[in-house]
Amino acid sequence: MNTDVFFLALSQLILSILLAIIIFFISYKILIRIFKLKEENLNGSNLALSVFFSGIIFSTGYLLSGIIPSIINSIELLKNNTEGSLYVEVLKYSSISLFVGFLLAGVIHFSSFMLTKSLTKHVDEVAELQKNNLAVAILLATILISITIIARDSLVFLIELFLPQPVATEFTA
């Protein structure tokens, strides 16, 4: 077994887990602020908010999980072609990819919410979620997850533009 590759894979796993925890923590804090909630009020009695928050967290995780294979492929490329420290390069490209992915996930979430608001002009979604309206929560989470599933491949393609790509050699006859 190649120990360099093993430690690189292990560090990538640890980095992914740490970044996921940080991203989910930030997402949770942003949601609390957007909905003007106090954390002590989230004691489990509001199922609608729990369903909606779960949809957002699932959506974020699903979007970012599509980026990981691209990062791993770029690690293989960097392993053979890097001039500096491999770990620094891996950290740089992983962080950039996951940060851009997190920002774009936020754009997708905001767009989904605005789409739902435009479709249901007679409903105040935020107030309904705070009143524990489970039907609104399921509708919001379903639209969000559906848009996430549709947009994931495009997001991954966009993120791959930030990652190192192999150089193709052109042969002429």
Image (cartoon, helix red, strand yellow):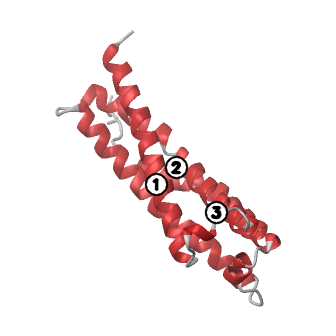
Sort mark 1 into few (<14), some (14-19) or many (20+) by Cα contacts within 10 Å: some
Nearest the viewer among 78 and 165 is 78
* Amino acid beneath label 2: Leu
In the displayed structure, would residue 122 be above or below residue 34?
Answer: below
Q: Quick one: label 2 or label 3, which is nearer the N terminus?
A: 3
Give the percent coordinates (x, y) of residue 81: 25, 30
| Screen quadrant of the N terminus | top left
What's the residue at 46%, 54% (across, down)?
23
Give the percent coordinates (x, y) of residue 95: 35, 48
Give the percent coordinates (x, y) of residue 131: 75, 79
Q: Secondary structure at mark 1?
A: helix
**107 sits left or right of 77 in the view:** right
User: Which residue was labeled with disc 1?
Assistant: 23
User: Which residue was labeled with disc 3?
Assistant: 53
Q: Secondary structure at mark 2?
A: helix
What's the residue at 31%, 19% (across, down)?
4
* Amino acid beneath label 3: Phe
**123 sits left or right of 165 in the view:** right
User: Which residue was labeled with disc 2?
Assistant: 64
- Examine the rendering and report whether any part of residue 27 can be seen: yes
Contact (Cβ within 8 Å) of mark 1 with mark 2: yes
Q: Quick one: label 3 or label 1, which is nearer the N terminus?
A: 1
Q: Secondary structure at mark 3?
A: helix
Single out the residue that lies furthest toward the top. Answer: 1
What's the residue at 39%, 39% (across, down)?
15
Give the percent coordinates (x, y) of residue 86: 25, 32
* Amino acid beneath label 1: Ile
Q: Label 3, label 1: how many angstroms apart (C-alpha)?
A: 14 Å
